[in-house]
Image: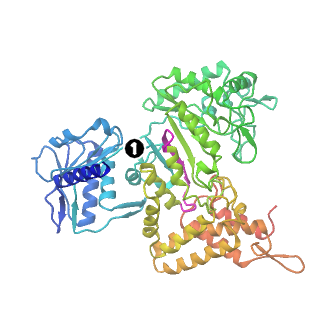
Amino acid sequence: MMKKLVNVLLLLSLYYVTDGQSLTLIKNGKTKYTIVIPENATVLEIQSGKVLQDYLFRMTGVTLPVVADNTGNAPEEILIGRVNRAEQSQVDYAQLKDDGLLIRTIGKKLILTGGKEKGIIYSVYTFLDQYLGCRKYTSDFTYVPRRRKIFLPPVDDMQLPVFAYREVYYNDVYDPEFMNWHKLHSFEGRGGAKTQWGYWVHTFGSLLNPKDYGETHPEYFSYYDGKRHAGLMPSWDKKSTQPEAQLCLSNPDVLEIVCENLKKAIEKKPEALYWSVSQNDNVNYCRCEKCAALDSMYAAYSPGEKILNTHSSGYSSLGMGSILTFVNKVAERFPDKIISTLAYQYSRTPPKGIVPRSNVNIMLCSIESSRNDPMTIGDQAFCEDLIGWGKLTSNILVWDYVIRFSHLFAPFPNLRILQPNIQFLRDNNVTALFEQGNIQSGGDFAPLRTYMIARMLWKPDIDIEKEMNEFIDAYYGPAASEIREYVNLIHDNNQAGKGVRMSIFGNPVQEKETFLSENLIAQYNGIFDRAEKKVKDKPEYYVRVRSARMPVYYAMLEIAKDEKTGNRGAFFQKEDGALIPKSEIEDVLYNFYYQGVKTKVSRTSEWHTPPKEYLEKYILFLNNREE
Ligand SMILES: [Zn+2]
């Protein structure tokens, strides 16, 4: 029975292949093909035609004319978008929706088209990438293979997005071509992207501002530690002077003011669909009697069962009851909009006995997760929360974190967990994914991590090991094998059970006995010495290798500062007790600083400290003048 079935399948596939024609798009400097766009083409269709023409020329030296579809119908055509050719009847645009794409050969024609948002241009870039071998590794590094001939076997490839919303929050992403190539979004409309978002996150403070109401109506703000707090700044903001606050969501006046201000904001930006009504970036939620009653009424667990921890102090994550009661009421007033709210820190756990209204979006954040292991192993509490939310709604955006924000240049070996995490989210009803990387420039393996995540947001099951190797080969050239050796060594030493919990707010000093041990750091330096030698005459590779090395330097500097003396310390101790800065640490410091300024690194932490300031502070420390 099985064998019979296999035979039938074989026959079917043979039948298909022999039925379809192969296409010779370009051969020996010649082509019979034209690129056809609609007579009244959209901007995107025109752009798509020009992109294809441009890359085919760069590959072969042959220019295919871009013509309108009111020219005569020829047998050899590349049809871009909604052209008036009979083959269009075989395209199901309803299925392609917004961003779906179609690459299909019919006879000698090649159809490149897609859904009504970006599908058409996505089809062109996908064709260049997956069928012709072009690559967009970074905003300014594009690989275009040279070919004498472009031959295409029969193709029928429809791709629909796995995540309707895909954002990689890394500085280099927001190049318009990089975004189109990798099919990425921007909530802020960066890179010319169209955004559906009116407000993004942390909006309580602007929807009901403590500056306006703090003095006259303290009862609008959170009650904790025995009194009302109308502070504005989040705790991590150095300018914060007042205790930070949330809103007292059970107060009916708060609902009226928030809706009034939201209405005004929507009037200014009526085209935006998503509006965030969400907690400020602190965990000081309202514990007044009424708010606490709502939280406890809708809590799915008993108090104390869900204590989470982001930085140091723990908090209960059962605070969604009062928020969702409030947000559902707001959503009821704005039925044509989607009201988004955070399930974040104190509100992360899904409630019981209340469900989000149909026009409510839940933005669930994995800020607490450890990053050594995939979340299914390293953070089962988060996974439970995600699965729970998935049972309440299918409108979930997950906000995930992929770097170390407190030390952007500390080694952060999480490359192996990126794919299992994305796959897990895909498998659990997550329809939108925001991957927060470094929006400043630079950081540990920023270009590699950006590229890998971008590839996986479209194809979560892609062979990521192969993709990573390909990137490393292309980006580091003759030093690729050393970079690979380093990546493998540091990741091998950060496996389950080996490391302490790797948090996005950690310090490399915490890893000084694991993947940043003295022995391993020595090995990393050995690898990078070899790598640099291999590319010393090739400036474009050399600068990339030096950037990849910065995290090793940074770890050495932070550990040296922590240890002060001894093998890894910043100082020699003389017999009389005096501390003398070690010249090798000074070398590392100067190297780190120099590479930072050379590559326009803006900060070494998410919030502060450019390389120059890092250097100055470190010199102060070496001179023993730091407090
Ligand atoms: Zn309250």
Q: Does the segment drawn in magenta span residue 473? A: no
Residue drawn 48% across the image and 78% down it: 535
Residue drawn 63% across the image and 34% down it: 279
Rendered location of residue 15, percent (x, y): 19, 52
Rendered location of residue 550, percent (x, y): 60, 68
The relative height of residue 550 versus residue 241 in the rendered view (above or below) is below
The relative height of residue 520 versus residue 377 in the rendered view (above or below) is below
Residue drawn 53% across the image and 65% down it: 599
Rendered location of residue 264, percent (x, y): 52, 25
| The furthest residue to the right | 576
Kindly identify the amino acid type of the residue bearing the numbered disc 1. Answer: Pro
Instruction: Give the residue at mark 1.
Output: 161
Q: Quadrant of residue 54?
A: bottom left
Residue drawn 16% across the image and 56% down it: 33
The relative height of residue 403 versus residue 116 in the rendered view (above or below) is below
Residue 85 at least partly seen: no
